[in-house]
Every structure is written in C-alpha cells, then in structure tokens.
Image (cartoon, grey):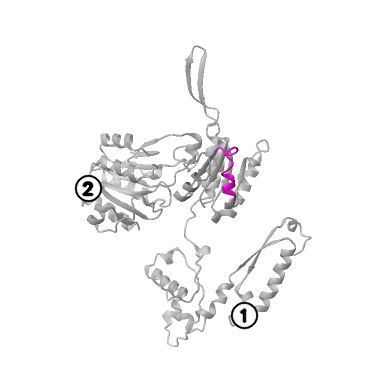
C-alpha cells in the first residue's frame, strides 16, 4: 500500500478478493506457497492497524477434486450443447473438464425439470460433504428490484409537502368561561425502532421521525448492515446544522440492544418491527413502553352475497401482490353457501394457477382435498394461504377475533347491512369492505410512507375502507 495516496489516510478496513487461480494450482490442489505468502501480507496489514476481510471463491477450486467425473467417451453432441440442463456433468466429463459452478437466472428456476435436476445435484454435493452456495447471475437477471430509489425519493417528497403534523390543534373545548382546553399534537420524544432487513425501511422510518420531530435510534437487520450505514450517512448529511445530525442514530450491533432497553430515562418508546419472538423478547426486557404488532394474519371473508368476480380480484391482489408484506392475506374465509359453487371453484383454481399453495381448515381440507393447515395462527409470508368455511358473518367475525392479529381484515359482500356489522364488530386496526388488505398502507392513506409506523407517529386511528 502506498501511504502517500490521499484516500489511504482514512482507511480502516481492507477487503482482499482472491480468485480460485490464486489459491489453487493447475491440477486443482491448494497452492500452499501462495497461501503462505498471502497470510504473511495479511498479518503485516493487521500489525499496521488495519482490519482485513478476505473474500475468495477458492473454495470452489479446492472442492474440484471431490467433484471429478469419469470420462464418458460416448456422450452425445446434444449433451455438449446443453450442459446447463444435464447437471450430472456428462458434457463436462466428455471434454475432461471438471464442473464446479453454474450460473442461473429467473427463467431457469421456472423450469420444473431444471429444479428437479438441481435438487438432485444439491443432494449429491451434500453427500460429498460439499456445501453449495447459489448466486443468481445478476448480470442478466430479469427480477425487478423489490424497491426503487425513485419511489423512495418521491415518498419522501410527499412527506415533506404534507401539512406540518406538530403543534396542530386537534380539539378545543371551553371548560368554563375563559377556560379553554386544547388538545395539540406533539412529538413522542426519542424512539428506538428495531426493524427488518430491507434497507428502504430505514429511509422511510428516518423521514417520518424527522417530519414528526422525534429523535431516533435505528437498528436494522444484519443482512442490510452496509446499506443501512450508507443510507444513514446520506440522511444525516442532509439534515441542516441547526437540527444536527445526531437527531438520528444508527445502532450497528445486536449486542447493544439490551443496554439500550435499560435507558427508560432517555428513550420514550420502542417500536419493534419483526417476528412475534422479537416483539415478545423486547416487551419482556424493558420498562420502556413498547408499541408494535408481531403478526400480520390478515383475513378476507367472502359473504354469501358477494360479487364473485370482484371477490376473485380482491383475493388475488391481497395474496399475490406482495406475499411477504404484513398486510397480505393469510386466511380466506368463505360462507358455507358458496361451497362447490362455480364462482368459488374458479377463484381457487385461479389462486393455484398463480402458484399459491392452498391449505385448509377442518372443513375446507375435506371439501377440497387439500392439506390441513398447520395452524390458523400461522403467518405464511409466502405464496400460500389457509382456507376455511364458516356458517355466517358472525362465525367469520368470531374466527377473526380468535385467530387474527388485529392488523387488517376485509369483507367482500353486496349486502350493506352485513358490511356494517363486519366494519363495526371486527376489532382490527384496519377493516375493509370490498377492498384488498394491501390497501392498508401509510402512503396509500396519505400519511407519507408505506409503513404503518406513519399512522403511529401522525395519528392513532381505526381505519375503515370501503371499496367500489
């Protein structure tokens, strides 16, 4: 390293990328001499105060000796033309080449034959005590990113253009002559928010905190640690000096959380976003008030008077638009009068064609010959859902109260009286009539961000949504 280069003076961590050719010889054996020299250089950097991370694909090369195939003289020309399909290595063996890596794309995984061959290959590798690591060939990936920078930027601008939520008079009451009581919005104080892996959550949470005048401590998932660090630097760098970049702090280690949870004199509210286990652990570990939902077990109830074409659109959107979201449908309840009807059969067929795995309650599993659901409390977070048959709207409401998570629940019906019963009696944060559960969204509600945290910071309400 040349210390005279200007950027070197601030460097604390060095990442060394070592290819297969460096750590292995031409015959596939480990190049012990080069490895020894490399270790000496790493030790020298350590002694100079640098943290060194060594990244290598050499494990692939080192494992080649365990993956050699016998030479197949009679391999066909077709085998040589399609090595990506023949995962047993015939094409490579015919050319006396060792196979150790395969690039894949989305379209490959859509091929059932490919997936079957891939499973067999993985089992063979595991039997050889080789652990395969799969990476999609991102150079030619067709998958759309789960979030886009432009969308995030626009959501922040919407938030910035909103009416100031602080110091708004929400209610004014004259208690006596000359004695006025005002209810005024104000910041909560310092928030500690523990959230999931996706980095866009950091941007939205931080923007909401700034807009609502709250101090913030952030702890994101370890999978997005580096992205979170960069995004935190960008956001704090944009905060004016009169406010100060320390308004938003980033917690980088999970080990710091227990100590932070003891600071009930400093932190005013903890908001965990994650699994039931995470929320429960935090509630049991602190005296600080904790606000957060653990599960997103959302229901769609199709009443006997429902427009089945509308029901199909709502259910498909609620389940397939973003299955991992907390507002995705996990349980479909149907009125017993709809059993075996053409409309319901068409809906279930459409779900299957979209790749949704169907599980049933005690009644639905028998009626439709589908596997029984592991539990009505189960949150799939994937292309799967539970179906159950209920006697009437009151049975549906009882089911939701017993097994739901009070997040978002929906009724599909043309009977306005039934809709009113459902809207008034279901005790959930959001209750919808003829609208997908996916509409339960802070940005959709006009609160500036897709997180339901936006409704926590700006408002605390029970939402009713009536679709058209």
Q: Residue at x 22, y 48 (%)?
A: 338
In which quadrant of the rendered image does the N terminus lie? bottom right
Q: Which residue is mark 2?
A: 338
Q: What is the x, y in percent for residue 371?
A: 29, 59
Magenta stretch contains residue 266: yes
Q: Is residue 32 above or below residue 349?
A: below
Position of 322 compared to 135: left or right? Answer: left
Residues in magenta, as a range: 256-268
Element carrying mark 1 = loop
Q: What is the x, y in percent for residue 42?
A: 70, 68
Image quadrant of residue 85?
bottom left
Q: Is residue 121 above or below residue 360?
A: below
Which of the pair 44/463 is nearer the observer?
A: 44
Q: Label 2 neighbourhood size at 10 Å, few (<14), some (14-19), many (20+)? A: some
Position of 308 compared to 247: left or right? Answer: left
Q: What is the x, y in percent for residue 391?
A: 22, 44
Which of the pair 425/466 is nearer the observer?
A: 425
Q: Which residue is mark 1?
A: 25
Q: CA distance from mark 1 to mark 2?
A: 68 Å
Q: Residue at x 50, y 34 (%)?
A: 458
Q: Residue 275: tell me if it is visible.
A: no
Main secondary structure along the magenta-highlighted residues: loop
Q: Label 1 neighbourhood size at 10 Å, few (<14), some (14-19), many (20+)? A: some
């Amino acid at each position: 390293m040349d210390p005279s280069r200007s950027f070197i003076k601030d460097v604390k961590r060095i990442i060394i990328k070592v290819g297969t050719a460096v750590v292995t010889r031409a015959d596939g054996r480990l190049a012990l001499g080069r490895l020894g020299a490399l270790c000496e250089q790493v030790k020298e950097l350590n002694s100079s105060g640098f943290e060194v991370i060594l990244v290598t694909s050499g494990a692939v090369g080192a494992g080649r000796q365990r993956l050699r195939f016998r030479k197949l003289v009679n391999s066909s020309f077709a085998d040589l033309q399609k090595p990506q399909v023949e995962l047993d290595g015939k094409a490579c063996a015919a050319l006396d080449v060792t196979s150790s890596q395969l690039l894949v794309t989305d379209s490959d995984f859509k091929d059932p034959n490919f997936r079957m061959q891939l499973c067999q290959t993985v089992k063979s590798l595991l039997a050889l005590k080789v652990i395969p690591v799969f990476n999609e060939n991102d150079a030619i990936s067709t998958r759309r990113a789960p979030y886009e920078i432009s969308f995030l930027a626009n959501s922040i601008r919407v938030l910035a253009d909103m009416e100031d939520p602080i110091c708004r008079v929400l209610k004014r009451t004259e208690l006596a002559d000359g004695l006025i009581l005002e209810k005024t919005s104000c910041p909560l104080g310092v928030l500690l928010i523990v959230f999931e892996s996706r980095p866009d959550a950091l941007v939205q949470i931080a923007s909401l905190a700034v807009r609502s005048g709250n101090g913030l401590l952030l702890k994101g998932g370890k999978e997005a640690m580096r992205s979170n660090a960069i995004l935190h630097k960008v956001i704090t760098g944009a905060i004016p000096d009169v406010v100060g970049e320390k308004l938003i702090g980033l917690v980088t280690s999970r080990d710091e959380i227990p100590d932070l949870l003891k600071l009930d004199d400093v932190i005013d509210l903890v908001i965990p976003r994650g699994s039931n286990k995470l929320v429960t652990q935090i509630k049991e570990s602190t005296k600080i008030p904790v606000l957060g939902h653990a599960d997103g077990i959302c229901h769609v109830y199709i009443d006997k008077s429902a427009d089945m074409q509308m029901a199909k659109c709502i259910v498909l959107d609620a389940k397939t638009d973003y299955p991992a979201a907390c507002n995705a449908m996990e349980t479909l309840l149907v009125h017993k009068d709809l059993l075996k009807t053409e409309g319901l059969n068409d809906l279930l067929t459409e779900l299957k064609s979209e790749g949704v795995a169907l599980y049933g309650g005690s009644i639905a599993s028998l009626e439709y010959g589908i596997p029984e659901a592991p539990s009505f409390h189960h949150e799939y977070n994937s292309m799967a859902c539970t179906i159950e048959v209920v006697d009437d709207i009151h049975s549906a409401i009882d089911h939701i109260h017993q097994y739901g998570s009070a997040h978002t629940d929906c009724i599909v019906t043309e009977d306005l009286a039934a809709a009113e019963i459902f809207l008034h009696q279901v005790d959930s944060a959001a209750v919808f009539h003829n609208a997908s559960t996916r509409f339960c969204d802070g940005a959709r509600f006009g609160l500036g961000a897709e997180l339901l945290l936006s409704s926590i910071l700006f408002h605390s309400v029970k939402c009713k949504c009536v679709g058209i």
